[in-house]
Image: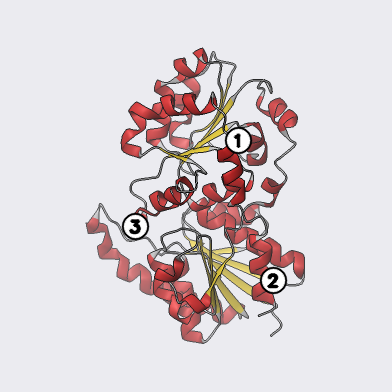
Amino acid sequence: MSIQRVIISGGGTGGHIYPAISIANAMKEIDSSIAFLFVGAEGKMEMEKVPKAGFKIIGLPIVGIQRTQVWKNLFFPFKLLKSLFLSVKILREFKPDVAIGVGGYASGPLLLAARFLGIPYYIQEQNSFAGITNKALAAKAEHIFVAYPGMEKFFPAEKITLSGNPVRKDLIDAKGKKAKAATHFSLDPAKKTMLIIGGSQGALSINQSILAGLDRLAEAGVQVIWQTGIAFESIAKQATANQSSLYVSAFIYEMDLAYAMADIVISRAGASSVSEICLIGKASILVPLPGAAEDHQTENAKSLVSQNAAILVRDSEVKEALITEALKAIQSDLSSIEKNSLRLAKPNAAHDIAQFILHA
């Protein structure tokens, strides 16, 4: 079958959005005539990031199931029904040859509608613990691309390909950019540098620990590139106003330079962050988000720790342990962790997925 029109659904976090954009870009490289349409959730970050990457996106009113404010789930059935109705309308108007779901609640209604209309669809699962949406839709999927081994416990074994997670293409070329990175962030290339990334929204527990440990980092002569998230940016900037060895920003767009500058990365254990860290072969301290669905971030982190490819600090231990662990790590030989991290990387994931779908 010749594929000319592709619809891609999913989002909610950078962990879903960047793989989706990477797959679309890889397909475009293979066949520039393909038309793309993205479908996401209204008000979520994909509505900004996808157009910035050059693709059109339509938002659905779908929301996630609330695990804490349970009363909000009263509106869920209505938003789901409306999203399903809109998805059918979008599919009938766009007429895609295939649909691709990258997880997150935004992909559910679109893939359900595709199944109803007989449109073949594919699933890409980023995490080591499969999400509810992907598990529910797996049985009728054409194929499922996963990033971790052992996913047969969630999906039909005969439909699985261990492809790895698609990542932003510029990160593949991060090596060799340290001098450029030092200039960009106004830091010293000869000094040890710590990169703090808390995911697209920032990570409060990590941010608070770094804030409390600024004096210890300064005493140790460690530089910091600190991605705070919007909510914590002003607090961090105020606290570091007179320090030249820190770069603070709500969001870092030049992640290739940030990784190139870093000797160690402190990060949440979202699937995309873990894949990026492996791709560039960096040592990392992973702090899984405790409220993540099915605790998938802890599973992601454990999969690296079990192969000596990362260090795990639980969120409940961050206040006492993070700065101590980070200083101990950055002052030690990290080469074996870096080697093991790089060994887990799959740099051709986006291209492999694109090739599989286009030539199925």
Q: Looking at numbered disc 2 in the image, what kind of residue is underneath it?
A: Gln
Nearer to the camera, 128 or 138: 128
Q: Would residue 350 be visible to someone looking at this image?
A: yes
Q: Which badge, 2 or 1, comes first in the chain's sequence? A: 1
Whether 314 is drawn above or below 169: the answer is above
Element carrying mark 2 = helix
Q: Earlier in the sequence, mark 3 or mark 2?
A: 3
State the separation of the CA atoms marked 1 and 3.
Answer: 32 Å
Q: Secondary structure at mark 3?
A: helix
Residue on which disc 3 sits? 294
Residue 166 lies in quadrant: bottom right
Of residue 162 and residue 143, the one placed in the foreground of this image is 162
The disc label shown at residue 335, or none: 1
- In the depicted structure, whether residue 310 falls above or below residue 221: below
SS category of the residue bearing label 1: helix
The image position of residue 117, as x and y in percent, is 50, 86
The residue identified by callout 2 is 355
Q: Residues within 10 Å of mark 2 (few under 14, many from 20)?
A: some
* Image quarter hosting the C terminus: bottom right
Q: x%, y% of residue 9? A: 53, 67
The label shown at residue 141 is none
Residue pictured at 36% horizontal, 60% vertical? 64
Would you say the residues marked 3 and 2 are in contact, meaning their CB atoms lie under 8 Å apart?
A: no
Please identify, in this view, whether the residue under mark 2 or under mark 1 is nearer the observer.
1
Q: Amino acid at mark 3?
A: Glu
